[in-house]
């Protein structure tokens, strides 16, 4: 379908809730979304493209056709959206990286000496499966903790094949294993220990704990103190394991707190699990590229995926922002849990403090996992994609004009390389070829001088930028394009468009297409920094020129009168008026005769023409 046909189809959709499924020419599902009103939501994709993020523009360019499924309610649309995303894993949806789904703990019951392992899914193979759990890392930690608490083997030996063949390994000497490879250990003892492990995974911690306490007390009565100490240590390990396993299973967690941080190169979704008011565990999910969607869209998508496949859920979930569909999501999670699950977006108080902690964990995870070079490279890569460049821009030059009238018109050239200011390459320009204020003419002159010197091989201008950023709108950008065309150069040009608060709100092409940058905080901050730096550099030079000119004296135009002679004359005569009225003899008393004669004749020439030089005053009130 053509773009116009897609647009027409979108406008013909009903104002009803449902799900829309975007597909490319190969009939691959590339995006799945839900809507309260299908017509309004889907039509937005085929409106003004300048308001879209780069990711959305890329997605829309790949759409060949789309389907919709009308639902009876927003709740049904949410459930259907979650199911379709899980099934199709669309390219342009925000997806958790773990494509293997939620992990299980597998116990191979068919083996004589069964062991625990991590499994991606529950199979019908005669094994016992526990779960699904949260992250794979935490689930593996549970296996390790259970084996350590009950001193089960984690080595590579196979039982009963390797029993009695070698001495016990290091795990036994470290107190982590009861040496099941020795001939004096029986299969019945092993099965009893496995039975305890199974009951722990079933949440029967109190039952197992009471058994161990009974055995410990009996061993103490029998004066088997070494055995009693071993059972005591095992009991304490199981106590610590209790909260940890409950949290990973999400079966008895009171509260989950979600946090999110978007970095330049990576973003992180964090979930803190609380049991009985205590932080017991956390999950972290890193994303390699920054996401362009609004925070509420990102959090909503991640929450649906994180909790959508679980049967055991916390009683309440705290979110860092309003996601817009809390009500249907609470209903979906409550039905999955078989009890009420509450979703809260706190604004203040203790719960808001928990959100800040979750966000801080997410931010620190991003900072830990991201180098400065990665941040800059990803930022420039994203900027290049937004601007439609074949490669990320390394060297960016920005230009601005500063004036307060017809005099002292100046321009600044600021250079950013690798996303950072390169101050040694900054340049100032004095506008030479115009009388009154004309920013377009001034920009033409500055760019012509800059790139002509590049063509002439001037070592101060011998590097060609990857893009030009011009402070101003479409007309300023077109001035730059004309200069480059005149000189036979081809460099991408973009104007920096400001809002009412003098902040750069968008970039604009010479053709007039606006590229929004406010959706991405990192890009917005970079372009804003470049614009502010360019403006600052121009203003400072302009003020310097005005300051110099404000102290310009008529004496400066007289040959032979330098700074020292001018100071002598002004100190003695107090003003230009008195110097002009002085006789030659009076002047000779202050400065050498040749200088006095030059000053005398200079002012007499004006008196004879009756065109006295217009006087100026300095900041102290002196005539200059």
Image (cartoon, grey):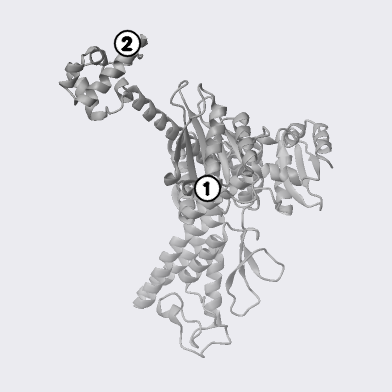
Q: Nearer the viewer, residue 340 or 42?
A: 42
Earlier-in-chain disc, 1 versus 2: 1
At x 77%, y 36%, the residue is: 72
Q: Residue at x 23, y 26 (%)?
A: 594
Side of 114 relative to 617 (left or right): right
Q: Residue furthest top?
A: 610
Q: Nearer the viewer, mark 1 or mark 2?
A: 2
Q: Residues within 10 Å of mark 1 (few under 14, many from 20)?
A: many
**Considering only vertical position in the picture, is 209 above or below 321?**
below
Q: Which residue is mark 2?
A: 607
Do labels 1 and 2 touch, CB within 8 Å?
A: no
In this rendering, position of residue 61 left or right of residue 505? right
Q: Tell me the crowding category of disc 2: few under 14, some 14 to 19, or many 20 or more residues within 10 angstroms, Cα based.
A: some
Image quarter (top left, top right, bottom left or bottom right) of the C terminus: top left
Residue drawn at x 43%, y 71% as measured from the top left: 215
> In the rendered image, which quarter is residue 11 located in?
top right
- Is residue 334 visible in the rendered image? The answer is no
Disc 1 secondary structure class: loop
Left or right: where does residue 316 sit relative to residue 87?
Answer: left
Residue 52 point in image, percent of width and height = 66, 37
The residue sitting at 59% across, 58% down in the picture is 133
- Residue hosting label 1: 264
Of 426 and 228, nearer the camera is: 426
Q: Secondary structure at mark 2?
A: helix
């Amino acid at each position: 379908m053509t773009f116009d046909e897609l647009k027409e189809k979108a406008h013909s959709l009903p104002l009803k809730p449902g799900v829309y499924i975007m597909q490319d020419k190969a009939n691959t599902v590339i995006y799945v979304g839900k809507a309260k009103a299908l017509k309004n939501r889907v039509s937005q994709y085929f409106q003004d493209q300048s308001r879209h993020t780069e990711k959305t523009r890329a997605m829309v360019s790949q759409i060949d056709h789309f389907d919709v499924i009308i639902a009876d309610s927003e709740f049904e649309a949410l459930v259907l959206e979650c199911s379709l995303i899980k099934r199709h894993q669309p390219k342009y949806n925000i997806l958790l990286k773990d494509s293997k789904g939620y992990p299980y703990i597998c116990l191979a019951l068919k083996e004589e000496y069964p062991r625990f392992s991590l499994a991606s899914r529950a199979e019908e193979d005669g094994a016992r499966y526990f779960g699904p759990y949260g992250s794979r890392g935490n689930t593996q930690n549970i296996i390790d903790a259970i084996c350590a608490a009950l001193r089960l083997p984690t080595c590579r030996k196979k039982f009963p094949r390797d029993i009695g063949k070698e001495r016990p390994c290091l795990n036994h000497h470290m107190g982590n294993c009861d040496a099941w490879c020795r001939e004096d250990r029986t299969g019945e003892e092993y099965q009893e220990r496995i039975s305890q492990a199974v009951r722990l995974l079933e949440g029967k911690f109190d039952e197992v704990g009471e058994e161990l306490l009974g055995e410990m007390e009996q061993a103490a009565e029998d004066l088997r103190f070494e055995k009693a100490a071993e059972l005591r240590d095992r009991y304490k390990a199981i106590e610590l394991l209790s909260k940890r396993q409950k949290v990973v299973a999400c079966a008895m967690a009171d509260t989950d707190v979600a946090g999110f941080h978007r970095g330049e190169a990576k973003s992180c979704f964090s979930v803190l699990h609380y049991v009985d008011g205590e932080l017991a565990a956390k999950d972290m999910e890193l994303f390699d590229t920054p996401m362009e969607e609004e925070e509420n869209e990102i959090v909503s998508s991640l929450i649906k995926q994180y909790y959508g496949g679980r049967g055991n859920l916390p009683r309440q979930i705290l979110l860092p922002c309003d996601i817009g569909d809390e009500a249907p999501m609470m209903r979906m999670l409550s039905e999955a849990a078989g009890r009420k699950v509450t979703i809260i977006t706190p604004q203040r108080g203790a719960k808001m403090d928990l959100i800040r902690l979750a966000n801080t964990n997410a931010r620190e995870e991003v900072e830990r996992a991201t180098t400065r070079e990665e941040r800059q490279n990803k930022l420039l890569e994203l900027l290049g994609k937004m601007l439609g460049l074949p490669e990320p821009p390394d060297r960016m030059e920005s230009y601005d004009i500063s004036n307060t009238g017809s005099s002292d018109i100046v321009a600044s050239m600021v250079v950013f390389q690798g996303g950072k200011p390169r101050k040694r390459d900054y340049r100032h320009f004095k506008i030479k070829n115009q009388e009154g204020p004309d920013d377009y003419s001034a920009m033409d002159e500055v760019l012509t001088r800059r790139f002509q010197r590049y063509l002439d091989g001037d070592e101060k201008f011998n590097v060609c930028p990857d893009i030009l950023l011009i402070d101003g709108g479409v007309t300023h950008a077109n001035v730059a394009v004309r200069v480059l065309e005149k000189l036979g150069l081809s460099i991408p040009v973009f104007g920096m468009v400001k809002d009412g608060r003098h902040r750069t709100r968008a970039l604009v092409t010479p053709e007039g297409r606006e590229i929004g940058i406010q959706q991405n905080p990192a890009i917005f901050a970079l372009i804003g920094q470049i614009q502010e730096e360019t403006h600052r550099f121009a203003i400072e030079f302009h003020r310097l020129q005005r300051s110099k000119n404000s102290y310009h004296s008529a004496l400066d135009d007289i040959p032979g009168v330098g700074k020292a002679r001018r100071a002598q004359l002004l100190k003695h005569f107090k003003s230009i008026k008195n110097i002009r009225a002085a006789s030659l003899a009076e002047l000779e008393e202050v400065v050498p005769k040749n200088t006095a004669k030059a000053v005398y004749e200079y002012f007499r020439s004006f008196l004879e023409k009756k065109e006295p030089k217009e006087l100026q005053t300095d900041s102290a009130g002196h005539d200059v």
